[in-house]
Image (cartoon, rainbow, N blue to C red):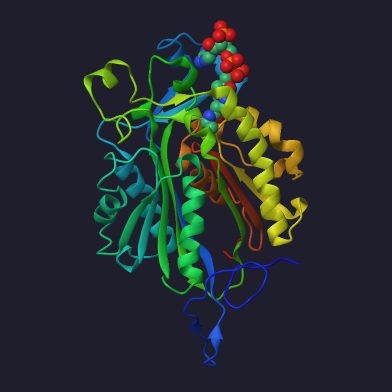
Amino acid sequence: MTKFLEIGRGGITIPTGKPAESSRGEPARRFVEIAGWGHYLPLHVLSNQALEKMVDTTDEWILTRSGISERRIAAQEESTSTMAANAGQAALDRAGMDARDLDLIILATATPDHPGLPATAPLVQQALGAGNCAAFDITAACSGFVSALITASQFIISGAYRNILVIGAETLSRVMDWTDRATCVLFGDGAGAVVLRATEREGGLLAFDMGADGRGADHLVIPAGGARMPASHITVEQRLHYLKMNGREVYKFASRILPQSFNRTLDKAGVSPEEVELLIPHQANMRIIDAARPSLRVKKEAVYVNVDRYANTSAASIPVALSEAIDEGRVRHGAIVAMVAFGAGLTWASVLWRWQG
Ligand SMILES: CC(C)(COP(=O)(O)OP(=O)(O)OC[C@H]1O[C@@H](n2cnc3c(N)ncnc32)[C@H](O)[C@@H]1OP(=O)(O)O)[C@@H](O)C(=O)NCCC(=O)NCCS
């Protein structure tokens, strides 16, 4: 039987919060629902053919190694906060909610507008006109959005907050070394968002799995510009402010953790893979998804893919895919949706969600 994350039930433990009052004066069971969704992608399309003119690569190499055909690149005047605000506003519009009703904004990003401080979420708060609600960033690279979704859900299920905007947004083009063909062909820019709302309607977050293995921290890293290696003319000359990747090691990790984390989440919820109607894996690379597919044991048509059009947008990849999938009518009332993320850290985060909409 499916288990739900909510107050006063066994199975999966959630810290006790303040239960809402039902009309009968009894504490009502409080669930979390996705009330709105939206995404924003920059207009500029950078195709593999255009990349052939920039670095020593071919459309065929990129397609066979990653499944990527094109990616979006932010305009000069755009940044993570502007794209996040666009996606956030779309999600608020869909929810029919005013930004002033938000209790909290959580922004997941590895490419904040500023290194360290201020966080980017307060900039988004201002752009949306969201008053003085709480606002902070979560940094878990490509696992960031799912980690933020899990975090935000805890605030709602515990009774602390009612309305939360969760965004994943990235301007990865700004940390790409456009002379490094091994990385620059794989990433893109974009933003996706959901509005989470407290509800008495059963469903929402069924189970989650999160983890990290810091032994792999150097496999996917921006070496300079932080406290460990502050910016200097040497770090600039050595191009250490750009993303560096050990592709082989990341590939091995990703194709192992994707099915492992998904299966752990299924076990926690007591759900079988056949019951999952939509699985959104982090859109890093088609080969990773294909390698993991047999161990996922879901129906072939359940796996959502848009990496061919947007490449790897890190924390934005899952909310953009979710938003597109809902718009395409892929999520019906009562459907179980899985989201599985993995990335730098190394980190991973998965959720199972029952759709109340
Ligand atoms: C990056 C990745 C696509 C490389 O694929 P691969 O089959 O392992 O390729 P290799 O590393 O063996 O490199 C093969 C050759 O292609 C070359 N190459 C790398 N990038 C290239 C490009 N864009 N175009 C043409 N050749 C390229 C390499 O230099 C290497 O050449 P060499 O054999 O002469 O040294 C693969 O390792 C991968 O998908 N890793 C995971 C990346 C990822 O998803 N990261 C984010 C996770 S959140």
Residue 308 appears in view: no
Residue 260 horizontal/vertical position (percent):
68, 44
The quarter of the picture where residue 3 lies is bottom right
Direction bottom: furthest residue: 24
Vertical order, 203 against 263 (above or below): below
Q: Is residue 8 above or below residue 269?
A: below
Residue at position x 24%, y 55% in the image: 126
Total labels: the figure holds 0
| Most foreground residue, 87 or 267 | 267
Q: In the visual, does 124 lie left or right of 203?
A: left
Residue nearest the observer in this picture, 50 or 282: 282
Task: Name the residue rendered at 54%, 93% in the picture.
Answer: 24
From the viewer's perspective, is 191 left or right of 297? left
Residue at the spot x=61%, y=33% of the render? 253
Quadrant into which the C terminus falls: bottom right
Q: Is residue 274 left or right of residue 66?
A: right
Query: Residue 55: image x %, image y %?
Result: 43, 11
Residue closer to the observer: 328 or 231: 231
| Residue 202 position within the rendered picture, expressed as x and y whole percent measured from the top left | 61, 72
Residue 128 drawn above or below residue 283: below
Q: Quadrant of ligand 1?
A: top right
> Could you tell me if residue 131 is visible in this image?
yes
In the image, residue 160 above or below residue 83: below
Q: Quadrant of the N terminus?
A: bottom right
Nearest the viewer among 98 and 182 is 182
- What is the x, y in percent for residue 197? 46, 67
Figure quadrant of residue 11 = bottom right
- The residue located at (46%, 36%) in the rendering is 313
